[in-house]
Image (spheres, helix red, strand yellow):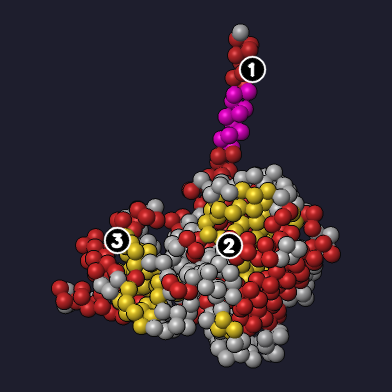
Amino acid sequence: MKHSARVIGGVAALVMLTAALGSAAGASGRDEQVPDEDHHVLLLSVDGLHQSDLSWYISQNPTSALARLSRRGVNYTNAQTPVPSDSFPGLLAQVTGGNPRSTGVYYDFSYNPSLLAPGTTACSTTPRGTVVAYDESLDQDPSSIDAGQGLAGLPGSILSMAANPTTLINPANLPVDPTTCKPVYPHQYLKVNTVFEVARRAGLRTAWSDKHPAYDIVNGPSGNGVQDLFTPEINSDATGYSGDWTSDNLATQQYDTYKVQSVINEIDGYDHSRTVRVGTPAMFGMNFQSVSTGEKLPTSQGQPGGYLADGVTPGPVLARALDFVNTEVQALTAELRSQHLADSTTIILSAKHGQSPQDGASLRRVDDGSIIDGLNAAWAVGHPSSPALVAGSISDDAMLLWLSDRSQAAADFAKIYLLSTPAAANTIDGTNTTVNSSGLSAVYAGAATAGYFGVAPGDPRVPDVFGIAQHGTVYTGKKKKIAEHGGADPQDRHVPIIVFGAGVDEGRTITTPVETTQIAPTILEQLDLNPRALRAVRQENTRVLPGLR
């Protein structure tokens, strides 16, 4: 009996030791597994793509590339993005496994009461609190697609753009850390690591293509997660068009082709510019913008954008954008086959966010600037010597406010004002109207906002006030938008996830709820890496997508 007990105890001790080592590896972020160096994951994010869009397109085009991915992959038809459903939280969900409560990133434009304004040099004496803008405003030259690199022959030469976009960010536009008195780059602002960093640490190659140099954020806190980061500026002047690359859907498609070509070059074993042979990345991919502008533009090339009156069927511009994405996905999958990589590559297709409203009749465009001015004026009546109440705000189809007074009383004041104040609006045809409660259906204030996002009250990054928009409300000073994202509307959040290719069962549909945060641990599992090497995965207990094998 004693001998048996010692044997059992030895086995138990071995199990406990193994578990302890695994726990220690997860806790430290180290990955003790041996990666599959012959496996690749290609992540494709189609901004604005709703699950309903994909379902409609496949029904109309059953032999299309998107239909093939759906038919032969695993489809998650009840997937949701984080809130706020903006591009930064949306992409970070996919590459960190975390929501804003873990990443610390609520939007690409926010406010932080702990940092100093850009350009600050007297860091020990300057009051803290600044807008944190991680968008095109960071570029050395926001008007140029190469963000100020100075390439000749643009836009045709854009593939020669630097693979390290941090060099294209003007540090004078970055917030300043009061402790170091140095600029805070986007990757330094992220609180958790990314799949790119985990892959790099395991000796695997990484690449990504996106829409601003500010997407340096996907490098993660180490600053070196992505070896080849291609980020042509989408909000720059579009050659041959009036406006930027988002002002015409054909311009957006042209812009997206540059990123597609960068990925094709990487599939072929080159860097994004096709000048250096480096081998096909293990973890790589890109973001499409064409569907998003197809939903937001009222017209393009003389045709209407958005949806038909039923709110489900894409109109001419959006249908053409879906055709474009399908053609480019077909080109990417064909290139994988031509390079004999189809059997060793997992493709994951999803979206950073959807867009609302799909039904144009419910659209109400509201000038959020007038609402903020009114709130500040109301606060000033009782606080004439205080600064403006709203220190920072962003409102697309949600309202996020950071206040100069972070007390619960101030947050409650803002909530009461917003819910009791009507606002001027206009409809899709420009007719003037009014919305009640500032266009909001619910407002969280102070501790309630922190509770909504799952952080402690007083967290320096969480908004003091978070307003959920009434369906159809879009905050804009312009009359051009017919849809937007960034809020909690189901149409903002209900996006597809398809996982297709190597290591995946064919032809399965899973209807149980999942989140786009689950893409990140799934990527690592496909590469034979430990999903719990991601800090956000450990913090939120984010699961690998179910039913892949």
Image spot of residue 257 (x, y percent)? 69, 77
Pick the front one: 331 or 470: 470
Whole-number angstrom distance, CA of label 2 to CA of label 1: 58 Å
* Identity, as a three-letter code, of the amino acid under mark 2: Ser
Left or right of residue 315, residue 463 in this image = left
Q: Is residue 61 visible?
A: yes
Residue 446 lies, with reference to residue 431, above or below; the image says above
* Identity, as a three-letter code, of the amino acid under mark 1: Val
Image spot of residue 135 (x, y percent)? 50, 75
Question: Do the residues under discs 2 and 1 have CB atoms within 8 angstroms?
Answer: no
Location of residue 26 by image quarter: top right
Residue interval drawn in magenta = 11-21
Residue at 53% x, 69% y is 310
Residue at 52% x, 56% y is 80
| The N terminus - image quarter | top right
Mark 3 secondary-structure assignment: strand
Pick the front one: 201 or 59: 59
Marks 1 and 3: which is nearer the front?
3
